[in-house]
Amino acid sequence: MAEIAEASNLSFVLNKPFDVKFEQKPKPSIESPHDVLVAINYTGICGSDVHYWVEGRIGSFVVDSPMVLGHESAGTIVAVGSAVKTLKAGDRVAIEPGKPCRYCTPCLAGHYNLCDDMRFAATPPYDGTLTGFWTSPEDFCYKLPEHVTLQEGALVEPLAVAVHIVKQAEIKPGHTVVVMGAGPVGLLCCAVAKAYGASKVVSVDIQPARLEFAASFAATHTFTPERVSAEENAARLLKEAGIVGGADAVIDASGAEPSIQTSIHVVRRGGVYVQGGMGKPDINFPIMALCVKEVTAKGSFRYSSGDYKLAVEFLSSGKVDVKRLITGTVKFEDAEQAFKDVRAGKGIKVLIAGPNEKSCRCIGGH
Amino acid sequence: MLSATENNRSFVLHSVQNVSFEDRPVPPLRNDHEVRVHVAQTGICGSDVHYWQRGRIGDFVLKSPIVLGHESAGTVVEIGDAVHNLKVGDRVAIEPGTPCRYCDYCRSGAYNLCADTIFAATPPWDGTLSKYYSVASDYCYKLPDHMTFEEGAMVEPTAVAVQVTKVADVKAGQTVVVFGSGPIGVLCQAVCKAYGASKVIGVDISDSRLEFAKTYGADGVFKPSKPADGADPVASSEATAQEIKKQFGLGEGADVVLECTGAEPCIQAGVFVAKKGGTYVQTGMGKENVVFPITTACIRALNIKGSIRYTAGCYPQAVDLIASGKIDVKRLITNRFTFEDAEKAFELVKQGKESVIKVIIEGVK
């Protein structure tokens, strides 16, 4: 079992692109009676963390001043506020890293992922979770069942992203689903779609190794696109997967323009297309096909009410197995190397142990 | 700010049927997100009268004195440090139920179902029949300059009607039968028309309520006949439904039924008057348990839903419906009282006269 031995609040800080440092920051404290204080055990690296490290910005979010990276974490509760009812010190939790205001219209309407004043870990200017300790409202920490490890707990965040995407896609039992992109989110979308009862789940990627993994993980079919038109790729995909008339739901977890174009030709008339992946902000889009086929296209952003809970439930019941996605765990001090490895496309999901995490088994890394 | 002699005169329910005026402390802001409102007008609701007369509604039991009232509008006189949507001097309608914001219901947008809601004049919480009332700023909605405080006090029941139609998912071109033509019933009728319903029928047992409804939002009105002595009640309700369908050319049924009475015969008739696959929404409250045509509901694949209070967007919608002139709430205000005559106002509502629709009480000046 992992132990929290010290009270180090060593943090992995991004100053500007490729300029990171380790810094002891003041240990955060409980500010509100609803808060808990969590010692971070493990943090996964996301493409967005890497993007900030490389580019120093995503869209209008610019790293103007030093910022702690990381947001996919699991930890152990060390203290609780006076109004906390369901958690106590020692509880192991998956952490939902975005704190909404609870007052704006989107919050009151139940779409807190769209909060006007969201404070999201490692989205400037807010510090992330690659640190020793993290303050969270009680309702944004989810207790892990005994049989779920803290390493799996760090995968709850991307799994919750996949849950949110699949809900947006309105996937129902018996549906045929196509997922563009076999990175961690794409793979998890396949797994969640299956858990929702999809009869066919087609995973699409240009990397053979990723597709091989997808087939062994959750996809019923795989597809490698060629450098032909979107319509041609779509036609061949549907033929090879034995899907007549188009897929009920198509999810893009790649952000790649050709994949997005192909998606609209893969989805059936009246079907649902969900944009989960992020690539070029503006692309060439088959608008006419969307129109005449009456496709419902929706965006999907992070997660909102019920998604984390369902993600933990999927882990608990074994319906989704995330352990296979963890291809490496490194010590906190090796965080920068882990970022380099992720950027180089090594492995699927790399975890960084928290600075107080003594007894993690560190495999792979570099 | 406050002078040393500032008072907060309040209309307090001490125990069943026992009310009086009291000088209460001026309510402080509970946190940085709150505002204090100088209440200008308050409407009376059946629930206020029920607490006064019976001391309980369901699990909510009067155990200690509470200030009454929850349908109010007023002027903002103080704002907390974190308040950005309002400034001192703004005229607002007050949404009287503030939820916890932390539970699963709140987080999923169903804050009307929050178990820890602080609701004005639901025991143990004080209501708005005080000079001042403190409330979360995001639960106060600015009134356009041309809207009066009296109209502002009518926003609450209008918001109830907006929620009912939201739950019923009323769409343009649909046919709607509304059981009950009291304040909520006629507001539901008016909101349905505003949403483009093609035919709205108001039902009541009172001739004068129906006469009003006909001039308000209903396209047609209906008064059920009394069942014959010894007749089977459910069969009588079914006959009522058939009569409504026939008289108003509803074919095999209405798209939507809004039940705003809570009366057993209306509930039954409502199930029978809905078309196959239609929607039935229960918002009226009467007997807790009624004889319900469950097999009919099953065979005709009805969508049956409950509606309680309001959710995100209802208050802004209600303000807009009134401000734009789509709904004229002034016509519903039939009686006005000064603050010192509050008890008389309650007595009047209690009498249940047909000619009385909405009674409002002016705030403490």
Image (cartoon, rainbow, N blue to C red):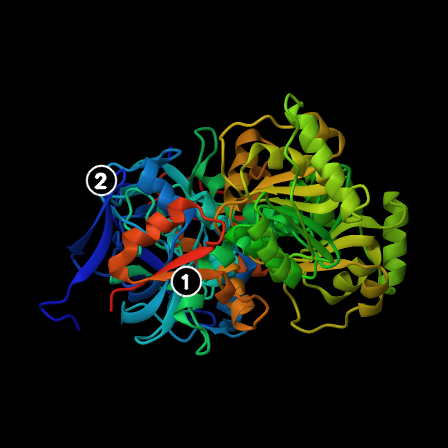
The residue positioned 60% from the left and 52% from the top of the image is B210
The residue positioned 59% from the left and 25% from the top of the image is B291
Compared to residue A209, the image places residue A231 above or below, namely below
- Mark 2: which amino acid? Ser
Compared to residue A249, the image places residue A60 above or below, namely below
Q: Quadrant of residue B74?
A: bottom left
Q: Quadrant of the N terminus of chain B?
A: bottom left
Foreground pick, A25 / A317: A317
Q: Position of residue A150 (x, y in %)?
A: 44, 39
Q: How many marks?
A: 2
Mark yes or no: residue A169 visible.
Answer: yes
Q: Quadrant of residue B362?
A: bottom left
Q: Position of residue A318 (x, y in %)?
A: 58, 31
| Residue where numbered disc 1 is placed | B153
Q: Position of residue B233 (x, y in %)?
A: 64, 26
| Residue where numbered disc 2 is placed | B64
Foreground pick, B41 / A129: B41
Mark yes or no: residue B120 visible.
Answer: no
The residue positioned 24% from the left and 62% from the top of the image is B131
Foreground pick, A247 / B188: B188
Drawn side of residue B242 relative to residue B105, left or right: right
- Residue B34: mark: none
- The chain holding disc 1 is B
Q: Going by the picture, which residue comes out furthest to the top?
A: B230
Q: Quadrant of the C terminus of chain B?
A: bottom left
- The chain holding disc 2 is B
Drawn side of residue A332 relative to residue A318, left or right: left
Q: Secondary structure at mark 1?
A: helix
